[in-house]
Image (spheres, coloured by chain):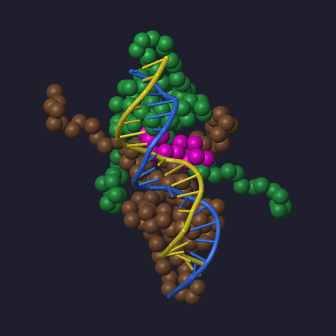
Chain colours: A green, B brown, C blue, D yellow
Amino acid sequence: MTTLFTQSTEPCPMVDFVNLVSGKWAIPILYRLIVVDDAIRFGALQRAVAPITQKELTKQLRAFESIGLVTRAMYPEMPPRVEYQVTELGKTLKPTLDSLAQWMREHREELSAPL
Amino acid sequence: MTTLFTQSTEPCPMVDFVNLVSGKWAIPILYRLIVVDDAIRFGALQRAVAPITQKELTKQLRAFESIGLVTRAMYPEMPPRVEYQVTELGKTLKPTLDSLAQWMREHREELSAPL
DNA sequence: CGGAATCCCTTTGGATACTG
DNA sequence: CAGTATCCAAAGGGATTCCG
């Protein structure tokens, strides 16, 4: 028998996930980095996830960096070069996101209207 | 060789997906309906996805209904009873969302700060 | 080149009150 | 019970400008 003070419910994984990767471009960016599976320059990434703005791309990358999903490498050259790369932790999301992408491709037609 | 007019890039599945199930509560609601795998009353669903507001729950359910992921059944009784249930199409998302939930549970600790 | 900063409009979503 | 309607604050996010 549980008491009033027993916390039997774990935090909802889905709520946590949404809080983790929120924002219109979060998943597209992360998945792109995962698929590329190599260091990629800021500019190249922006073109790959077009038409994202610099501001949004920067914000999301900072967020991913702060939780350990992405690394950032700055090369103090002229002109400056900055490369981003998914971490090993980030790569563990690959099967899940592959599945998501595949689902979307398979059911795009089937879904009523919106797309 | 592609020309300037050849559209070789398919629409990004991830962008489509995010547009499809956007919003703070979308995935938690849908996953709950999938896990329950049965008709569930509005009130019960709200309690299950607490602390969501009536307004948000209604909005999301309408959205899911409109794209064919969820069905709505109204019973004109007193008091009114309305039941929601995931469709067969919605159920096809189960493996993917299971994977997502599992990933979150496995890596909750590992992720820096935010949670 | 890769931002940071600013401006500003749009969207989201919480709280509350009301209704059939 | 299951909404709908309203109000309002906060967040999202695009466009633009400036900078090392």
Where is residue D11 drawn, in percent x and y? 55, 48
Image position of C5 (left or right of A67) = left
Give the residue at x 64% y 52%: A12
Give the residue at x 15% y 31%: B3
Where is residue A101 drawn, in percent x and y? 40, 43
Q: Quadrant of the N terminus of chain B?
A: top left
Q: Is residue A88 magenta?
A: no
Q: How many marks?
A: 0
Image position of B57 (left or right of C9) = right
Q: Quadrant of the C terminus of chain B?
A: top right
To which quarter of the image does residue A113 belong?
A: bottom left
In the image, residue C9 above or below residue A45:
below
To which quarter of the image does residue A35 belong?
A: top left
Q: Nearer the viewer, residue B15 or C10?
A: C10
Region in magenta = A16-28
**Does the magenta stretch mainly form a helix, a strand or a loop?**
helix
Give the residue at x 38% y 26%: A43
Give the residue at x 56% y 72%: B42
Furthest toward the top, the residue is A77
In the image, residue B30 above or below residue A53:
below
Where is residue A11 drawn, in percent x and y? 68, 51
Where is residue B19 drawn, in percent x and y? 41, 51
To which quarter of the image does residue B57 belong?
A: bottom right
Whether residue A17 is visible, yes or no, is yes
Q: Nearer the viewer, residue A42 or A48?
A: A42
Q: Nearer the viewer, residue D10 or B17?
A: D10
Whether residue A104 is visible, yes or no, is no
Q: Nearer the viewer, residue A106 or C11?
A: C11
Q: Is residue A27 magenta?
A: yes
